[in-house]
Amino acid sequence: MKNFKLALVILGLAVAAGCATKRKLMDVPMVSMTKYNSGDYELKEMGPISGKFCADVTEDEGNMGLIDMSVMNAQKQSGADFISNVSVWAEAGGCTSIEGTGMKIVKSK
């Protein structure tokens, strides 16, 4: 009986650890929630930026828009016009996060 309880505890810890990690969803070359086409502008690199958004499980239905909100949060916090070399992550608790390089418009082409 003790071995069975120990096995259950170990299994529970393994499941909890698996749920707590983040999982890569995709990589994207360039994104923006405020501009349409990065090819229309000369851009300057700002450095690494990130953003995160967690759905309110009592209000939101499904996962639609989580990535968009993560991108928007990163742009608002950093002042970036575009984000390049983006990695999109799913995290525990209905959250998504993004990491990438902030890009600022220098001038129109």
Image (cartoon, rainbow, N blue to C red):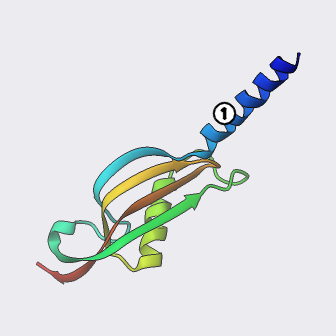
Q: At 74% from the left edge and 32% from the top edge, which residue is drawn?
A: 12
In the displayed orientation, state which residue is furthest to the bottom: 107
Question: Which residue is identified by label 1?
Answer: 14
State which quadrant residue 109 falls in. Answer: bottom left
Element type at marker 1? helix
Tell me the quarter of the image containing the N terminus.
top right
* Residue 38 horizontal/vertical position (percent): 21, 68
Q: At 64% from the left edge and 52% from the top edge, which residue is drawn?
A: 60
Q: Looking at this view, is 43 or 39 the one in front?
A: 43
* Residue 81 horizontal/vertical position (percent): 32, 75
Above or below: residue 39 compared with residue 62: below
* Residue 63 horizontal/vertical position (percent): 55, 47
Amino acid at pointer 1: Ala
In the displayed orientation, state which residue is furthest to the left: 109
Above or below: residue 5 compared with residue 86: above
Q: Looking at this view, is 35 or 97 the one in front?
A: 97
Above or below: residue 98 compared with residue 107: above
In the displayed orientation, state which residue is furthest to the top: 1
State which quadrant residue 102 falls in. Answer: bottom left
Mark 1 Cα shell of 10 Å, populated few (<14), some (14-19), many (≥20): few
Q: Looking at this view, is 84 or 109 the one in front?
A: 84
* Residue 17 horizontal/vertical position (percent): 64, 40
